[in-house]
Structure formats: C-alpha cells, structure tokens
Amino acid sequence: MQEAKAASVGIVGGGLAGLAAAVALAERGLQVELFESRRCLGGRATSFEDPETGELLDNCQHVAMGCCTNFADFCRRTGIDNSFTNHDRLHFFGPDGKRFDFHATNWLPVPLHLAPTFMRLSYLSIRERVGVGQTLRKLARTQFHRKTEEPSIGQWLRANRQSEQAIKRFWEVLLVSALAESLEHASLSAARKVFVDGFLRARTSFHLQVPNISLQGLYDRVQAWLEARGAIVHLGASVSSVEALQDSDQLSIAVDGTRRRFDSVVVALPWRRVGDVLPPERESVAASATQIQSSPITSLHLWFDRELTDLPHAVLVDRLSQWVFARSSRDRRHPDDEHYYQVIISASRDLATRDRADVRDEVLDDLKTTFPAANDAKLLRWQMITEQHAVFSVRPGFDKVRPAQRTSTPNLMLAGDWTQTGWPATMEGAVRSGYMAAEAILDSRGISTPVVVPDLPVSWLSALLGMAP
C-alpha cells in the first residue's frame, strides 16, 4: 500500500470518465491531480445559468437506467445517489395522445415481465405486437463476430419483415433516444445492447434514474468528495501535450506553459481532442479517433404560464418531440410564475436546415396534442440548444475502431465513453471507461483490485432462452 500512496496520477479531462478514474484511484490512496480546461467539471454533460432566474439548467437532460451498475456505484461512492429520482414506470403517449404506462409485472419471470404492458400498446396492431415480440427474441439470441460485416439495425429490421409502422412506433421510439442515432446509421449490436441490458436482463433494468438537481450541482459534490480525499482539481487548466520522459519511466503533462511529472497519466478527452495531446508514438490511437463520427442532440427549453402535466416525463410516439421532462415545483425558483419543461430530440441532424421557430412550433403542436392543458398555456420564453458533438455515432463496425484503455505505453491510459467499453454513448460507458483505466493503472503497479462493477445477473429464463449477452 505504501507504493500505491506514493504513486501520482495525472488525469487530463474533467468529464464523467476522468472523474470516475479520479474517484477510483483517490479512494485507493493514489495521489490524483485532475486538469480540466473549462471553469467547471462535466465535459459534454454540462449546465447553463438561466439569465431570468439564475437557476442552473442542464443543456440536455441526462438519465441513467437500472442496468447502469457502474454509474450507480460511482454515485454511491461519491454520495450523490440521493440526488436521483427512480422511475419504475415509463409514460408513453401514442400518436392520438392516448397514455400508456410501461411497467413490469411481478407475476411473470424476466424476460417476460414487460410482456403484459407491451401487449397493451394499441397504437400497434395485434399482428405488429406479435411480430415485434418475435423479432425481439431473435435479436436477443443473435450473436456477433467482429470479422463479419454488420448491418444497421434499420436494415436488419426490414430484412426481418418489420412493418414501417412498427419500426416508427416501437423500434425508433426506444432506440433513437437510447443511442442518439437514426436506425439507418445505428449498428445492430448497439441496438441489441439496449434491449438485452436495458429491458430483458433484469426486472429493474429499464427503471429510469433522473437527476433532481443540475448536473453542475452533482459535479460540485463530486469535486468536494475528491478534494476531501487529497485529490487536486485544476479548473481552467489547459493541457497541450502528454510526453514520455527520457530520464525516467514517468510521463509529463504540459499545462499552461509548465510541465508536471506523474507516475501515470489518464487522458480522458473526447475523441475529437485526444489526438491533440497524445505523444507522437501514439499516432495509431489518434488515427482511430478520427474515424469516429458524432451525432447531435437538440433540447428545447420551454417556460409556460401554467402546468401542462403532473407527470415527471413523457415519451411521445411518432412525433418530432421524443421525450418531455418536467421540473417539479420544488425544484423551481418561481413555481407560481413559470413552469419549465425540456423537450429532447436525439439524432437531430435534420433540424440543421430548419428554421428554429418552425421547430419550436412543431414541438408546441406535439405538446398540445399530448397534453390538453397545453392548448390554453402561454409560452413565456424558450431556448433551443443543439450539441453537434453530443455523442459518438454507434455505426456498424464502430467497435473495430474503438481503442482500449491501455496503450502500448504501460503508464498511459485512455478513458472516455468512446473507448472500448462495450456500451454506447452513456454515462455508464463513461464511468466504466474511467474505472477500467484506473484498474489498469493499479494492475501496472502490482495492485490487483477489482474496480469495474459486474453487470446485473442474467435471469435463469433469459439464459435458458439464449438471451444472455
């Protein structure tokens, strides 16, 4: 343990991946310094201040699911788990505005626990519901080989005779929001991951975990947790390069004109920036990162003069608006004056050529069809934010270009949801990558201790039906 306490680790990037690595290493006694170029932590998942109220609002609503075991572990370790609200029902609204509550039954074993509620989705015909169920089972039993050419999930669904209406009203509704990619671009393996891990693996896999404070509020608490354990967090610290030293096994980080030495370094930057700081001998990693494409997410922030719904969230079927999130009255600074809602549109490339007011008007029409109260509500103000590089695109063959956390330099690791985690672009993937990088650093120092948390166990019936990952 003395060696562990003497070891120093520099972490480049203060997003969730870098924070996860920092938490895992600081908790095990290593000397951690984290460098973030911005004035706040969080990376791509960030918050902004509402100029009218001074309230912190998230650029885009982030959620986790019950299957996200490592993210849950990260929250428990840092004490932020009480800042999430668990939702065991998903509220769907069909094209005609009819509400369907998606929830598990207790009298059927996994993976049949969601079958009764699924069979009540009357916006799909009985034939389509049966066909979707059969195709889900086939998808769950499908195994992949890296050497074979992988189709998109859209191609695969049509090859398996899914109707356009079933694709539009079931598959797109769940997959586009989960993967932030269109079905024509998203890989078959990523789609399978969503359904197997998110819905078919365990009874609570699909539960939604929604922050009840801003993301910035969460990161501030994580920073305090780190600093209480001796870690040093540098904000507004821009790292220009990471280099191997000739006179020792250490690495140096060039930050704001100075050089700092560390026994190990974790580069936890987005795929678009990682090549800017890696040493020249790591050109292959940078080259792989350049092959990764981005997918945008658009959020509309809407303030009304009255409440539209008492539901915390809504999933809108066959509409431009995909998810609607409501801020509860206890979270608002002026609950009597304004009612805040956020509408999420993932894989929003098509919006780039549309007038912003036109997008707003279509979203308002979606809300009026879904919530009767919206017809009498007055829109007080609104804001539309598009993150062009919100997530990486999970295209067919993407896993072949994802780099591992370990590099050929023993004490240089990568972290980021875009690295080889087996997960799409999620907070779970980000935490896993940070944990995997931390585990590799500990292993390189002869400290054999598990960091990564196992997945939820597969139910006996899922395993019997061949639905294991």
Image (cartoon, rainbow, N blue to C red):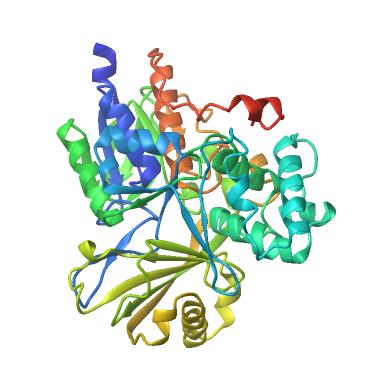
- Quadrant of the image occupied by residue 374: bottom left
Query: What residue appears at the point 37 percent right and 75 percent down from the top-left corner?
Result: 308
Q: Position of residue 88 (x, y in %)?
A: 43, 47
Query: What residue appears at the point 57 percent right and 43 percent down from the top-left corner?
Result: 199
Query: What residue appears at the point 69 percent right and 49 percent down from the top-left corner?
Result: 187
**The N terminus - image quarter:** top left
- Quadrant of the image occupied by residue 353: bottom right
- The residue furthest front is 107
Q: Position of residue 53 (x, y in %)?
A: 19, 74
- Quadrant of the image occupied by residue 73: top left
Q: Position of residue 311 (x, y in %)?
A: 38, 63
The residue nearer to you, when weighing 450 against 134, is 134
The residue nearer to you, when weighing 70 against 148, is 70
- The residue furthest left is 228
The residue nearer to you, when weighing 51 against 143, is 143
Residue 170 drawn above or below residue 373:
above
Query: What residue appears at the point 69 percent right and 62 percent down from the top-left corner?
Result: 124
The residue nearer to you, when weighing 87 against 451, is 87
